Image (tube, rainbow, N blue to C red):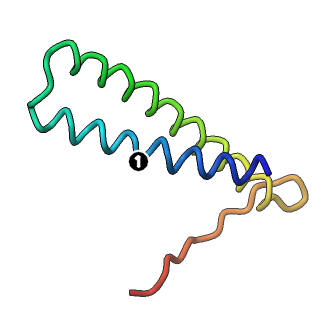
Amino acid sequence: MAKKKTAVDFEQSLGALQGLVERLESGELSLEESLTAFEQGVSLTRDCQQALSQAEQKVSLLTEQQGQPVVEPFDGPAE
């Protein structure tokens, strides 16, 4: 269940971060509101970076063979 919660938390954090950026870019916030939004954005960015780092570590563990990491090309979906 924790795996699903992490993915949801990442998506929520990313969405909140995008909303903060839009509010900051609008130029309609006061200085105090802008500073508060910036602080929240820094915190959300750290949360997202941590979640991505954990995901990268899990992928590395899953792709190890005989204790050595296996590097394979990633082919994204065809467009």
In the image, farthest residue toward the left: 27
Indicate the quadrant containing the C terminus: top left, top right, bottom left or bottom right: bottom left
Where does the image place residue 8, in percent across and percent down from the top left? Answer: 60, 51
44 or 12, nearer to the observer: 12
Position of 10 relative to 37 (above/below): below
Position of 34 relative to 53 (above/below): above
Where does the image place residue 14, in percent across and percent down from the top left? Answer: 44, 45
In the image, farthest residue toward the bottom: 79
Identify the residue at horizontal 48%, vertical 41% (top origin). 13
Identify the residue at horizontal 22%, vertical 42% (top origin). 22
Where does the image place residue 62, in percent across and percent down from the top left? Answer: 79, 59
62 or 49, nearer to the observer: 49
- Specify whether 78 is left or right of 66: left
- Specify whether 56 is left or right of 14: right
Residue on which disc 1 sits: 15
Q: Amino acid at mark 1?
A: Gly
**Residue 35 sits in quarter:** top left
Position of 34 relative to 9 (above/below): above
Q: How many badges with numbers are in the image? A: 1
- Specify whether 8 is left or right of 62: left
- Specify whether 79 is left or right of 76: left
- Circle 1 Cα neighbour tier, 10 Å, few/some/many (<14 / 14–19 / ≥20): few
Identify the residue at horizontal 44%, vertical 86% (top origin). 78
78 or 46, nearer to the observer: 46
Where does the image place residue 65, in percent across and percent down from the top left? Answer: 85, 62
Identify the residue at horizontal 66%, vertical 63% (top origin). 71
Q: Secondary structure at mark 1?
A: helix
In the image, farthest residue toward the right: 66
